[in-house]
Amino acid sequence: MILVDDVKNGSARVNPTSDESSKDGSKGDVRALVRFSGELSTKARRTRARFQKRLALNLEDAFKAEDLDARVRRDWNRLWVEATDESVLAPLGRTFGISSSSLLVGECKAELKVIVSQGQELFSKAVEGKTYAVRARRTGSHAFSSADIHERLGAVLNPGATVDLNDPQVTVYVEVRDKRAFFYESSVPGASGLPLGVQGRALALISGGFDSAVAAWMVLRRGIQLDYVFCNLAGSAYERMVVEVSKVLADRWSYGTHPKLHVLHFDPVVQAMQARAKPAYLQVVLKRLMYRAASEIALQVGAEAIVTGESVGQVSSQTLTNLRAIEDASSVPVLRPLLGFHKEEILDRAREIGTHDLSSRVREYCDLVPDRPVTASSPEDARMQEEAVGVGELKKAISDRNEVDLRSLRPEQMVGAALYVTVVPEKATVIDTRSVEAFELWHWPGATRRDLDDLESQFRSLDRSETYVLCCAEGIRTAYVAELMQRQGYEAYSFLGGAPGMRRARSRTTPHVVE
């Protein structure tokens, strides 16, 4: 159970331990000193108290989500976490509003003589034969200064060690807070920013690629709670990849909230566009329709803005002129946190937040114009092309959307329909893994045959731009290989029911064919 001490009227307990008269030194449990993001210290007293309370509640949710036995105590300038093991540092590093955390190795009374004695006992062996430095900071009224700690503890720590204030091998940190002094050896960086949930709610358009995931993370870091909108242009395998990327953001970075993913089936919308809009405007019109869908859902769920991953000049639809023409379609503000980022910065940030490898598997499905897309559309021209398409298909996509509770979604639920098909998609490549004899007796027209083990070990040589349907005797063994292929970015499925199911499907679609 996690216990959070409340801040009342802007003040709180100073002593992080439950027993102020306890013996000096370590208590046995793992304890961490947690520092607030610097932004919190600049807030007005009442705002700061509210932000710190929200941060503590988010940490409570983080520990629950990670199944950690931990409790939080807080004073006006620090959080103190008591836990059963060091794994508590992981969620501390992913909770917005925290600048850094340190595992405490000991504590004592805030008296200079006791601090020197306790520091020597804790660190004399650690610095033996090495270079070291003592770094101290102090808050409160004391008969000594931080410099006194540096001088006295540094002089007696270990006669066989050498002081090096510039590049020490070991650093001894001492933090004195009123009646107690705390010792630690290192700090783990936090995510900083503002506690999630203190700056309202927005809706992020997510494609599963690098940009949209990083843009969402940067908005989360500003304390804005997010839900997500995904306009699916390419089927269930693509949906599953986007769900996996979104789930990283939800599970690892959204403590204190329960984000939802709104999945819109956009195939009918794209077909209407291709039939009614000028080809050069397809990219701009597609983005306008996505903006329109996201802003409509934002109004329905109470979000105050939409978030996109656009960066100026990265693709044809992201010229400054086109961005103006596209934004005209949104009825709520549009946030673009990556506007000035270049691609390498975005990729580096994706690696840091844990979405890079998943996003690297996602193909570009939004590229509808192979040649000569418009790069300088006016809002009037873009609006005219959108009006030619109409909104009937878009309204249906919005009303028929699926909602996924990302944090409640279990891994096995992420396979399901995205792994199996009951029809062979148009232009798909069918790979039959049955024996030569079974294949010669009957196979899907145009299918190729490969041994299952051979396919499992060599599928990476296949063309990633194609769609694959795998077939076996029962539809079970190929599900495993289809799963492997999907995880490597292929659009691959196992036919439900195997070859018998495929043969029945063939008979239903072409009843005049006798097979």
Image (spheres, rainbow, N blue to C red):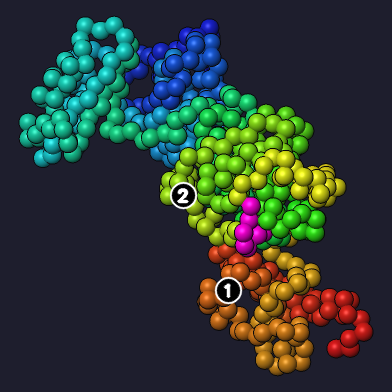
- Residue 370 lies within the magenta run: yes
Q: Is residue 82 left or right of residue 218?
A: left
Where does label 1 land, which residue? 463
Residue at disc 2, secondary structure: helix
- The residue sitting at 14% across, 25% down in the picture is 154
Q: Is residue 239 visible?
A: no
Say which label, 1 or 2, has the lower sequence index.
Answer: 2
Point out which mark residue 321 bears: none
Quadrant of the rendered image containing residue 415: bottom right
- The residue sitting at 58% across, 24% down in the picture is 198
Q: Nearer the viewer, residue 371 or 192?
A: 371
Where is residue 433 shown, x and y percent of the image? 66, 82
Looking at the picture, does residue 13 appear above or below residue 375?
above
Where is residue 57 shown, x and y percent of the image? 56, 26
Q: Amino acid at mark 1?
A: Asp
Q: Is residue 479 left or right of residue 67?
A: right
Q: Residue furthest left?
A: 159
Location of the C terminus (image quadrant): bottom right
Q: Amino acid at mark 2?
A: Lys
Q: Range of the magenta residues?
A: 365-374
Where does label 2 land, which residue? 343
Q: Is residue 118 visible?
A: yes
